[in-house]
């Protein structure tokens, strides 16, 4: 059986898994990213974990998803990691491991994962939107990732949207992820609490204590603040996606990540605003779907898919 | 010498030229598109012109640029042509001509032309913006045109921009081409005449009598309405281009067409707004350039380039 290693480097946890060509995660391990104080000790820890997982078995290669990954194998001043400057991740790993190593940003890995195992099989033109702490995106055109001149394309979380004034962490006014992400909908809950006087479970929960699943549960229970928040978020997402279609005319746009787990609550208002805003010659040509990889191993699978994609 | 035929189908004029691999237009002809009442008589006229131009010499193929061109060789309900429905341009021509025939929309041809002969040689990731009656665009990623699932990607003229309320011909509110195009700047001249009471040559010229070259001349003469109109247009274009960079991170954005002929008047305010709005990790990585093909044959050259690109 052919296998590859998939690695997901997150701000909190680094996950490492051995993945089959069919997308089954056979073995996995993880460790806390922040435990390692220097980047070189982090590399040693990562190499140790890879060796444990592979156990001297032959693998096809290693795929890594990380924030702020460049085309040249580096990670550049990532906001969520504590090491600064340009980190030579691929070069440092190659000194210690004799494998093909592929690096891309985490949302690009999600897109490649959907192509390999998920809802984008056989699609040449699609967009994946990851709705986590921020909003990430992976764009595929002509069957290839749109990576841009050095790998920083598809940063649609920083896309500045219509008539909106919230700031993102990077200081972008009206940046899409300030509205459409797990954090964005929390901000919208606060906004709805300011705007309306409806009774709501959220009147007794602080911003910091608020979690996405509770918003879904509240909406299911008929909480008007929760329902209004999903409608507001979906409208902005749907209108933005209709705008993105003028750029790359995808066959499908796939939503994944925390906020997408709310299912119909985010999907229905998004589709409604999307169809309304879409130009006539795109109507009924672009599907909005939820991810085909909705499980806890999706980040590992997406990273491993980089290996299959490049083999 | 290897040659190809390039054809530019415009609403008013159809141009046909014989082009060398180096981008020299050796022979050319043209006729009025609207003269032919049916699409089948138009095809006959086109075939006659192609045969005259080639004069039985062997050519590598035919490239055609047309509005609303699809990937499958059809033109779909183009606003500027009088024939309705889905026109089987490539199929109808193949019945009468034994050549490879490639069709793409006119702005895509401009992009391929810049890659073959102009300012995008050796670039794998760039965007061409054509500023004519409307705003067209050609996007190249990984060295390939971003055409989308059936050829209608890169319609950035219909991109809906921030806080703006003008309508495009297609009814898009805040559509970019309502502001940034030869027509858009004429609308802005009217807006500036409404907003300010400055003396201006434009107080005695009607909308219909107003032409782009006069706006450039007036700006050169210090006309405040003209200068304000360029500043307003460039600011919107620059901010929009900065937004587009989050999509495909091009190495360069190339401006071409009527409005680009104003040179510094459009370029300076565009660059200023662009650099101001660009995210930190894109700074100094994306050039804004004028076309390398600024002559009267550029549309023919761009269409012919489709042949070299596909050979």
Image (cartoon, coloured by chain):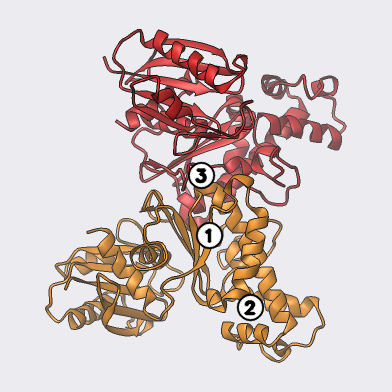
Chain colours: A orange, B red
Q: Quadrant of residue B264?
A: top right
Towards the viewer: A248 or B128: A248
Q: Where is residue A7 in the image (x, y as percent from the top left)?
A: 31, 74
Cα distance in 3D space between marks 3 and 1:
15 Å
Which label sits in the foreground, 2 or 3?
3
Q: How crowded is mark 1: few (under 14 residues within 10 Å), some or many (20 or more)?
A: some
Cα distance in 3D space between marks 1 and 2:
27 Å
Q: Position of residue B64 (x, y in %)?
A: 45, 26
Q: What element carries label 1?
A: strand
Q: Quadrant of the N terminus of chain A?
A: bottom left
Towards the viewer: B149 or B268: B149
Q: What residue do we see at 85% from left, 29% from top? A: B198
Q: Residue B153 carries which label?
A: 3
Q: Position of residue B3 (x, y in %)?
A: 32, 17
Q: Residue A186 carries which label?
A: 2
Q: Which mark is residue B138?
A: none
> Which residue was labeled with disc 1?
A287
Q: Where is residue A191 in the image (x, y as percent from the top left)?
A: 73, 75
């Amino acid at each position: 059986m052919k296998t590859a290693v998939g690695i997901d480097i997150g701000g909190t946890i680094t996950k490492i898994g051995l993945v089959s060509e069919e997308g089954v995660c056979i073995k996995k391990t993880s460790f806390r990213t922040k435990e390692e104080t220097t980047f070189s000790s982090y590399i040693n820890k990562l190499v140790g974990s890879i060796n444990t997982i592979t156990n001297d078995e032959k693998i096809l290669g290693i795929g890594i998803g990380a924030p702020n990954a460049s085309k040249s194998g580096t990670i550049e001043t990532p906001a969520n990691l504590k090491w600064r400057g340009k980190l030579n991740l691929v070069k440092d790993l190659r000194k210690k491991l004799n494998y093909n190593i592929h690096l891309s940003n985490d949302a690009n890995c999600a897109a490649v994962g959907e192509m390999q195992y998920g809802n984008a099989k056989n699609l040449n033109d699609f967009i994946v939107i990851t709705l986590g702490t921020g909003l990430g995106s992976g764009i595929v055109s002509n069957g290839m990732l749109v990576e841009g001149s050095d790998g920083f394309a598809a940063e649609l979380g920083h896309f500045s949207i219509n008539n909106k004034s919230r700031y993102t962490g990077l200081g972008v006014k009206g940046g899409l992820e300030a509205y459409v992400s797990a954090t964005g909908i929390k901000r919208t809950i606060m906004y709805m609490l300011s705007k309306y006087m409806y009774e709501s479970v959220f009147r007794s929960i602080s911003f910091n204590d608020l979690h996405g699943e509770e918003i879904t549960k509240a909406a299911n229970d008929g909480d008007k603040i929760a329902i209004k928040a999903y409608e507001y978020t979906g409208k902005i997402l749907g209108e933005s996606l209709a705008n993105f279609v003028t750029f790359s005319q995808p066959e499908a746009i796939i939503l994944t990540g925390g906020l997408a787990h709310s299912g119909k609550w985010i999907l229905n208002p998004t589709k409604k605003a999307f169809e309304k805003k879409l130009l006539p010659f795109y109507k009924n040509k672009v599907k909005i779907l939820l991810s085909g990889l909705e499980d806890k191993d999706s980040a590992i699978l997406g990273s491993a898919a980089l290996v299959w994609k490049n083999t």
